[in-house]
Amino acid sequence: MSKLIYIDTNVYIDYFDERSYGFRPANEFAFILIKRAMSCEFKLVFSDHLLKELTKHIHKDKVFDLLDLLKTKDKIVKINTTNGVKRLASEISRSKLIHYADALHYALALTIHAEAIITNDKEFLNINSEDIIIMLPNDI
């Protein structure tokens, strides 16, 4: 099975909104990640929580177009939030001192055994995890 990568909401928003941070072209890094997944380097974990957050910021047609493309190439692994994942997220939020929404992404990634979380969220980057690699999009 291909490596599983969980891409955080902010990276997808970088892609859709063509954002950059100063001289750093965040949208290009996001595009490269998606392109690498399409070329069979890894599969992307997509959760119901991620979909909910994305559709708050990005028109759902754009989100579903990307999802459909990834699905047709068999590059998506779906996971849904369960009560067990919610309990784990609550524990992570308390122990790692991160917001519950971020802890839920982390718990979902752990539950599906993703190898990495790709994020621009500094809160995630401060987590010292032995279970999963947490990195910036330009570091993968």
Image (cartoon, rainbow, N blue to C red):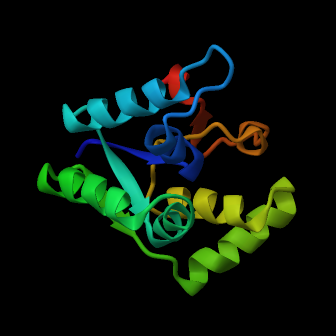
Task: Give the residue furthest to the top.
Answer: 23
Nearer to me, 66 or 114: 66
Task: Give x and y (percent) for residue 105.
Answer: 59, 60
Q: What count of labels does the image hold?
A: 0
Task: Give x and y (percent) for residue 25.
Answer: 54, 21
Task: Give the residue furthest to the bottom.
Answer: 83
Nearer to me, 42 or 51: 51
Query: In this image, 136 relative to 94: left or right?
Result: left
Query: In this image, 26 relative to 63: left or right?
Result: right
Kindly identify the residue that appears in the image at 52 percent across and 56 percent down.
Answer: 109
Kindly identify the residue that appears in the image at 51 percent across and 63 percent down.
Answer: 50
Kindly identify the residue that appears in the image at 38 percent across and 31 percent down.
Answer: 31
Query: In this image, 102 relative to 113: left or right?
Result: right
Kindly identify the residue that appears in the image at 60 percent across and 32 percent down.
Answer: 135
Q: Which quadrant holds residue 97?
A: bottom right
Q: In the displayed structure, would residue 53 be above or below residue 75?
A: below
Task: Give the residue furthest to the left.
Answer: 72
Nearer to me, 115 or 36: 36
Task: Give x and y (percent) for residue 83.
Answer: 58, 86
Q: In the displayed structure, would residue 3 be above or below residue 22?
A: below
